[in-house]
Each structure stands twice: as structure tokens, then as C-alpha cells.
């Protein structure tokens, strides 16, 4: 959510960052090429995105870009901040979130999502305010996807292949929070003020709600393929990324939902800036 009230989101198959408000509807913000995967607003007012390079399953972008973390100014200037984490070249950065320490944490699943195949090893990475980037944890062949940072600085992510929710503590200990139902293939997630995790389940077409301790609390059914979500107060915004048909052709049928939740609100997002 931008300070002017617009909701910004990526359109992967269009290679662009877009914005929505009730007055103007959906409008393009910036053409970035490749395959932008997720967006986060920094304390500098600029928008940080994960750039997967332009590969999703059989889809290939007509304008590929190096897999990277990019930053977009208010004027639409695109700047590449990182293409490596330590000695490792980024493969396909997926989701990102600022922490209370100002670091930008992101997942790099290690390649394209292809159910039934043997995935590459995935990684949890940190891009620090000074511009340095490092690998914090290796997840194995699990496809780490959505990521959030809790108030105490713990990093939580979901793994699409294993359906596992995991947490990295400040002491570098990694723990399993829970394993989601078999019907779920987790993609993105958001965190509420009371610590509950709202996780988009693409196969189950809805939102799984998980307590901080891993307790399963409920499910919000949706008519589509929810890919990510983010809170703005009591409203949960959910993206539907469309998908790929059996022919491998892109189905440009994405949607943006706004779900008013009567009994909860989102944890305010952390913000930071790089460099």
C-alpha cells in the first residue's frame, strides 16, 4: 500500500508493476520486463521487487532479465540492487519482506516451479541496508515461497513442495511450525496483529489460517487461484495470478480481491531502505 492509498502489485506474465485504487482502477506503474514476482514498499517510498528473470513453468518472458532484487522510484526508474547472495548467483527470487532491522529478506527457490519434478535447492537470503546480500539458510529441495518477518525479527516462510511452514529464529535455529493439509499448496502469506499466518493455498483455492504455534485455525474459500496476500488494517488484499493452461499458454485472468475481516487486522508492515 502506497502512502497515496494505491495498492501496488506485480503482474508477472505482463512483466510490470501495477497499481489500483477505487477512482482509477488498475493502471501500469512501471514496465520492468522479465518476471516480477512480488513487491514491498520501502521507507524511502520506493518499491522493491523480486525479479525471477522471466520463467514460470513452460512460460518464457519475451523480455528476460537477470534474476535479481530490483528497486523502482516514484518516477518509474528501475535499479538492480542484487544479483548474488554471497558467492551464489540468484536463481529466481520469489517473495520479499522487510524486517524490523531494516533488512530485506527474500526467498530464492532455486529455479522454476514444476510440480512432480525434482526441485533445485532453495535459499533464504537477506539484503542488508548497506547493500550487502547473503544466504541465511538453505531449505533443501522444498521450493521456499512466501515470506514474512515477525515483530521479534523471526523469519517465517512457506515451502510449496513440502507444504511446510518454517521459522528462522534470531539465534539461527530453524524450526518447523506446521505442515499444511494435503489439499494445500502454499504460495504467499501475511501476518495478523495477533501473530496468525494467512497463507494462500493455490490448489485448495483459498486462505489457510495458522496460529503462531502451528495450530490450524480455519480456511477462507475463494473462487480462483490465490497467489499472495497482504493486510491493510482490517482488509486483506489477495492476488489471483491467473495461470498457465494445459497448452502452456498464459491465461490472463488475474484478479485482485479485498476481503474485509471483522475480527482481526494486519500487523503493520516493516519498512526499510537499501543503500
Image: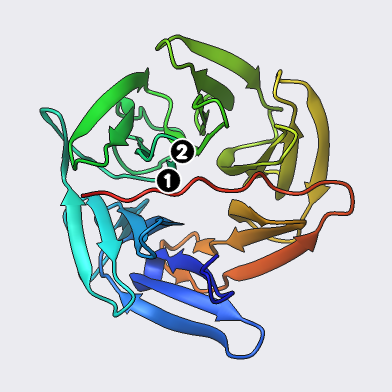
Q: Residue at x 83, y 36 (%)?
A: 218
Picture coordinates of residue 241, whole percent (x, y): 53, 62
Residue located beneath label 2 in the image: 145
| Residue 64 appears in the rendering | no
Give the colour scheme of this rendering. Answer: rainbow
| Residue 168 appears in the rendering | yes
SS class, disc 1:
loop
Q: Is residue 92 above or below residue 7?
A: above
For the residue carrying disc 1, how many other residues have a C-alpha within 10 Å: few (<14), some (14-19), or many (20+)?
A: many
Horizontal side, residue 190 vs residue 10: left or right: right
SS class, disc 2:
strand
Horizontal side, residue 225 vs residue 58: left or right: right
Horizontal side, residue 101 vs residue 186: left or right: left
Give the label on residue 95, or none: 1
**Contact (Cβ within 8 Å) of mark 2 with mark 1:** yes
Q: CA distance from mark 2 to mark 1?
A: 6 Å
Label 2 or label 1, whichever lies nearer to me, is 1
The foreground one among 246 and 189 is: 189
The foreground one among 199 and 168 is: 168
Count of numbered circles on the image:
2
Picture coordinates of residue 74, whole percent (x, y): 34, 75
Picture coordinates of residue 259, whole percent (x, y): 77, 61
Q: Residue furthest right?
A: 262
Q: Residue at x 51, y 61 (%)?
A: 243
Q: Residue at x 43, y 25 (%)?
A: 142
Q: Earlier in the sequence, mark 2 or mark 1?
A: 1
Q: Residue at x 41, y 41 (%)?
A: 114
For the residue carrying disc 2, how many other residues have a C-alpha within 10 Å: few (<14), some (14-19), or many (20+)?
A: many
Amino acid at each position: 500500500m502506497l502512502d497515496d492509498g494505491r495498492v501496488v502489485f506485480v503482474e508477472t506474465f505482463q512483466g510490470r508493476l501495477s497499481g489500483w485504487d477505487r477512482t482509477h482502477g488498475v493502471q501500469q506503474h512501471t514496465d520492468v520486463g522479465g518476471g516480477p514476482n512480488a513487491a514491498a514498499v520501502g521507507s524511502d517510498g520506493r518499491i522493491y521487487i523480486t525479479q525471477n528473470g522471466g520463467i514460470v513453468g513452460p512460460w518464457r518472458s519475451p523480455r528476460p532479465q537477470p534474476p535479481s532484487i530490483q528497486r523502482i522510484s516514484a518516477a518509474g526508474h528501475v535499479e538492480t540492487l542484487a544479483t548474488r547472495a554471497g558467492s551464489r548467483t540468484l536463481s529466481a527470487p520469489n517473495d520479499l519482506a522487510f524486517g524490523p532491522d531494516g533488512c530485506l529478506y527474500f526467498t530464492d527457490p532455486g529455479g522454476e516451479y514444476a510440480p512432480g519434478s525434482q526441485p533445485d535447492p532453495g535459499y533464504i537470503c537477506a539484503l542488508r541496508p548497506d547493500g550487502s546480500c547473503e544466504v541465511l539458510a538453505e531449505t533443501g529441495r522444498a521450493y521456499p515461497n512466501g515470506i514474512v518477518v515477525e515483530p521479534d525479527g523471526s523469519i517465517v516462510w512457506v515451502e510449496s513442495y513440502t507444504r511446510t511452514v518454517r521459522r528462522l529464529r534470531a539465534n539461527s535455529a530453524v524450526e518447523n511450525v506446521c505442515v499444511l493439509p494435503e489439499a494445500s499448496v502454499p504460495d504467499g502469506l501475511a501476518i495478523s496483529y495477533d501473530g496468525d499466518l494467512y497463507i494462500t493455498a493455490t490448489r485448495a483455492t483459498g486462505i489457510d489460517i495458522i496460529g503462531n504455534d502451528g495450530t490450524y485455525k480455519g480456511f477462507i474459500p475463494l473462487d480462483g487461484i490465490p497467489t499472495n496476500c497482504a493486510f491493510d488494517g482490517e482488509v486483506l488484499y489477495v492476488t489471483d495470478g491467473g495461470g498457465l493452461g494445459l497448452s502452456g499458454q498464459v491465461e490472463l485472468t488475474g484478479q485482485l480481491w479485498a476481503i474485509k475481516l471483522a475480527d482481526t487486522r494486519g500487523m503493520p508492515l516493516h519498512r526499510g531502505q537499501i543503500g
